[in-house]
Image: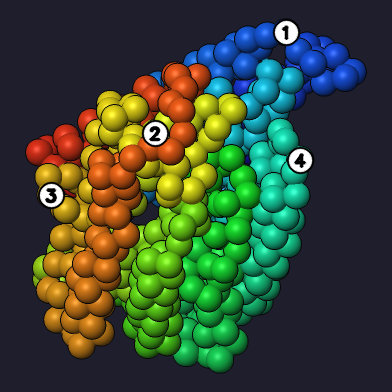
Amino acid sequence: MPAYDAINQAAGLIIPEIILLATVCIMFLASPFLVSETGKAAPGLRHRWGTLSLLALAAAGFAWLKSPISDTGLGPFQADQFVWFVRGLSIVFGMLLTMILWDQVEDGIAAEANACLLAILCGVNFVALSNDLVGIFLGLELVSIPTYILLNLGRHDWMRQEATIKYFLLSIFSSAIVLFGLSWIFGLAGTTNLTVIAARTAEGKVAIDHGMFRVALAMIIGGLSFRLTAVPFHFYAPDVFQGVSPSSAAMLSFIPKVVGFAALLRLLPVCVGLTGFVNWMPEGAVRGILTVIAVLTMVIGNLLALRQSSLLRLLAYSSIAHAGYMLVGLAVGNASQGTSGVASLLFYLSVYGVMTIGLFALITAAGNAGRPIRAIADLSGLSRTKPAIALMMTVCVVGLSGLPPTGGFLAKLNLFLAAWSEGSQDGRILAVTLAINAVIAATYYLRLISVMYFEESTTVSEPSDQNAAWVAGCLCAVATLVLFVAPQWLWNAAALALN
């Protein structure tokens, strides 16, 4: 195929990402002309940039719905059903995150903040799209680098600077580990193309029981565990969540998990000779590593969350525990009988995004620029001062705890059934551990509801100035209930992503 035709074909597979990247370039180029040398901008400029972001995401969403499904390709991109699913997550939740960010940033930095968020979403999609080791790493870095900038925008107090530095240093350390593992895979396979690697592994030209191969997989899992906030790469999360704005914490609670699991689901099956997820079952050392990490992440995340008085630190440890739940699906894989672990993982990831982003949006809406919600005590009496927000927040909290009637109940149930029906001792251990930790998690989640409804407020209530975040929170709370009543469409989409 001529080079021009190959480039044209590859570009046709990434139209949604081209739209988003073009918008990012417009924002970065136009912003300096609308902001003075002292950093001041016209009042309300953030509304224009927020509107442009939503329009770009809407255009990318239209292109996503019209995008072709291509299961073949030796080129740089592979736009299969899995890509279709990940794109849907990034676009839908990107809109919600834009609404949370809307009133959280000053007018002078709104363009840069929205541009960084769009670039991060592009990175997520490129990781899923990539049919090459180099492409996956570049996608991971397209998520990481704008995240450093986004975390440091706005106020420059010591807490934000400390949070940004911790995230930056540990992120580049994890990226180095992943890159080292990928380089070993390349050295053993002689190529960076995922399709060719899978073919050579299936033919036995690459020995998967080779010591270097096992070390490479361990480094890839370890490096990507940072993005999942999985133990033992979890310790940065509480400090970072506490130091950054709620909009940034919302993004960190969900987007890195999407990109981390997307990378793992692209790499792990390929390394055992499979080009898809339908017949993928982790075995040997990989299964053992995933099982241990899942158990430790669930247990440590939930136990440490019980001791927190800071709301954002509690949600950070909650995010760690939820990563452990999702790792159960990855460790189980797709058994020949019973519920699919990978489909349960993708279903849980989607529902978790609705609930956690909704909760952060409502936390943002419950406060204001002068008095943001930071500690659990700040929620005292919220049911009397802002009853609508308290009610919506209760729905999201109940969903995160895994209780009916919310989509969180079905999400945890699917993971439990996938682990139990797999039939092995490891699967049963994972299922029992998940059930026990769901009970532990309910303790600190119900404590938040108790504070909102049974404790008196110690501060004067002020009207919220976070209207966009309020709308996003309401949408997520309603979706949390709807996913309990009508979950089949989402489950079908998650199952179809495996084909």
Q: Alpha-carbon distance for marks 2 and 4?
A: 24 Å
The quadrant in which the N terminus is found is: top right
Looking at the image, which residue is at 72% across and 55% down?
A: 162
Q: Alpha-carbon distance for marks 3 and 2?
A: 20 Å
Sooner in the amino-acid sequence: mark 1 or mark 3: 1
- The residue beneath circle 2 is 362
Q: Position of residue 272 (x, y in %)?
A: 41, 75
25 relative to 451, above or below: above
Looking at the image, which residue is at 29% across and 55% down?
A: 447
- The residue beneath circle 1 is 42
Looking at the image, which residue is at 39% across and 33% down?
A: 362
137 left or right of 204 in image: right
- The residue beneath circle 3 is 404
Q: Alpha-carbon distance for marks 4 and 3?
A: 42 Å
CB contact under 8 Å: marks 2 and 4: no
Q: Position of residue 193 (x, y in %)?
A: 56, 60
Disc 1 marks which amino acid? Ala
Who is closer to the viewer here, 340 or 182? 340
Disc 2 marks which amino acid? Leu
Looking at the image, which residue is at 90% across and 18% down?
A: 37
User: Is residue 226 visible to the viewer in this orientation of the structure?
Assistant: yes
CB contact under 8 Å: marks 4 and 3: no
Q: Of helix, strand and loop, which one carries label 4?
A: loop
Count all numbered tags in the image, as a single digit: 4
